Amino acid sequence: MLVQLTMRHIDGRPIPNSPVDGIRVLALLPEKWHKDLRQAAGDIVIRVRAEEEATSAQIRAEVVRILARPEVSHLELVTCRALSAGHRE
């Protein structure tokens, strides 16, 4: 399953140009997921390819659980959008 995760600051402040928050989230995501960090329009955007049997709801639940950790608790998950396998941007 290929999904695009979009996160932003809980208080709506823009994410700084530094990729530090995105790197923190990447480090906390499961090792077995393939991850690609993108930062766009003040949001953190990460593409994740999880195992085929994973659903977007399961991926969303895992990311929400991760964002409850103190080091990234200032972020919220805005979207968890499933992408087709051939999707290119």
Image (cartoon, rainbow, N blue to C red):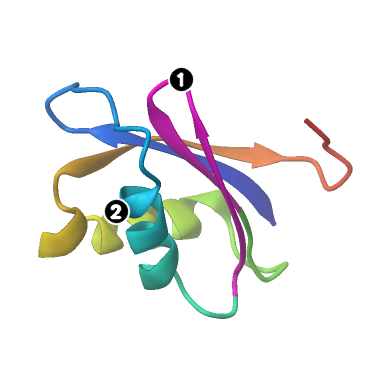
Magenta part of the chain = 33-47
Image depth: mark 2 or mark 1 in front: 1
Residue shown at 64% from the left, 41% from the top: 82
Relative to 40, is 17 on the left or the right?
Answer: left
Residue position marked by numbered label 1 in the rendering:
41
Whether residue 68 appears in this view of the structure is no
In percent of width and height, residue 77 lies at 33, 40
Q: Amino acid at mark 1?
A: Ala
**Main SS category, magenta section:** strand
Relative to 33, is 18 on the left or the right?
Answer: left
Residue shown at 39% from the left, 51% from the top: 22
Q: Amino acid at mark 2?
A: Val
Is 71 located above or below residue 46 in the figure?
below
In percent of width and height, residue 86 lies at 89, 43
Residue 12 part of the magenta segment:
no
Is 59 located above or below residue 76 in the figure?
below
Relative to 19, is 88 on the left or the right?
Answer: right
- For label 2, the SS is helix
Is 9 located above or below residue 37 in the figure?
above
Image mark for residue 64: 2
Q: Do the residues under discs 2 and 1 have CB atoms within 8 angstroms?
A: no
State the image quarter where residue 67 is shown: bottom left
Residue shown at 40% from the left, 70% from the top: 27
Front residue of this view, candidates 87 and 74:
74
| Neighbours of disc 1 within 10 Å: few (<14), some (14-19), many (20+) | few
